[in-house]
Amino acid sequence: MKKTILVLLLLLIMPLFIACNSSTQAFENPNTELCVASNTAGVFLCEKTTTSYFDTTVSLKLYYQASDSYDILEVFEYFENTLETYHQYFDKYHEYSGITNVYNINESTETLVLDDKLFQALVFAMDNKTLVVRDDTYLFNIALGQVLDVWHNARDNSNCNDSIELGILYCPVPNKEIDGITFHTNPDNVVLDAETNSISFLESDMSIDLGGYAKGYVANIVTDHLNSLDITYILNLGNSNVIGNGQNPTNDTSDFLIALIEPSTDFKIVNTYYQYVQLPEDMALVTSGNYQRFFKDIDTSEVYHHIIDPRTNYPGGDVMSVSIIYPDSAIADVLSTAIYLLDLEDAISFVNETENLEAVWYSYDGTITYSDGFQTYNYVISEQK
């Protein structure tokens, strides 16, 4: 059922490619299977899309020009290999031959030695757990695995009904599995030993979940490599994590133009857009919202989404979505989740007080709220040429 819903859900953010100059290409197509001529002279768009990793659609689009000499196939091979590697490391539901991953960590009662790539990803999470703290609680918490499992099972249980509303799942709310239950979710009880690259838990029944930053972290791994090759590209992980590099040669601004889809928890065939973003190179745009993965209460039709507040163990948030812009994709992923859980007034203050961070919020009544500096990234669609 989960995969069916993902197929039905439309992109929540969509790169816009606005032509500024139509002409015959000045050089031959570098790869006729992967590349097509753009509407701008001397630019081919080469794209690879996959749905095999992180339970979502991931795409990489290259802007290949006459001055480029990198091997397109090698770039896409690196892209897919990296996605596969980290997908397997971060997977909490399956084990894989030859590696120790999150599934193995959660199933083990002993200290486990990890490959360096996974260990460093965990170090990153632990180093950034204090980015947003409220009521003495880390709002970004990789140790929330026990609670997230309850909500995952609620979406997957046999009492759910997918025939009430097209494309929407209705399920019983797992109140009995949440209320009054003690969960071991303190990330301070996750112990990482840098000398041995090992992990252990100080409490029994603990488990970790890296979904709160996985796509942003992998985006950084991929883009660091692409940047070293001086490639102009736009990378879209999960339809909510976007980052580009280089000067976009297909529009007048040289930036990457992104459309934010109006959030909705009702199935829609046609999307509408509430905001257009002019995203400069090396800036990440990350969206968190209640409409990306959710079910409706089978009794009341209330929406229960996947962003769980560690203070209550229930879905949280004051708005339907928040989209943030920040130079680091992994940090942006962490922040978008935590900022979403803040009251709107608190969230606005936090963003305005944080250097290089901007955000736009979409409220339930359709109100759009901007941080102080967000207008720098605003693109007025009527001005396009």
Image (tube, rainbow, N blue to C red):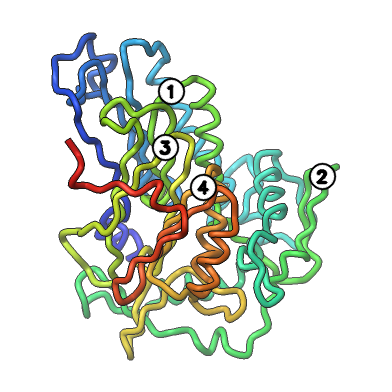
Q: What amino acid does circle 1 point to?
A: Ile
- Label located before the other in sequence (4 or 3): 3
Q: In the image, residue 90 lies at what x, y percent?
A: 57, 50
In the rendered image of this protein, does residue 127 appear above or below residue 366? above
Name the residue located 40 percent from the left edge and 11 percent from the top edge. 69
* Residue 7 visible in the displayed image: yes
> Label 1 belongs to which residue?
231
Question: 365 or 141: nearer the eye?
Answer: 365
Q: What amino acid does circle 2 point to?
A: Ala
Quadrant into which the N terminus falls? bottom left
In the rendered image of this protein, does residue 364 appear above or below residue 97? below
- Label located before the other in sequence (1 or 4): 1
> Label 3 belongs to which residue?
280
Name the residue located 50 percent from the left edge and 41 percent from the top edge. 219
Q: Do the residues labelled 4 and 3 touch (CB within 8 Å)?
A: no
> Label 4 belongs to which residue?
326
Name the residue located 61 percent from the left edge and 56 percent from the top edge. 103
Give the SS element for disc 3: loop
- Label located before the other in sequence (2 or 3): 2
Mark 1: give few (<14), some (14-19) or many (20+) Cα within 10 Å: many
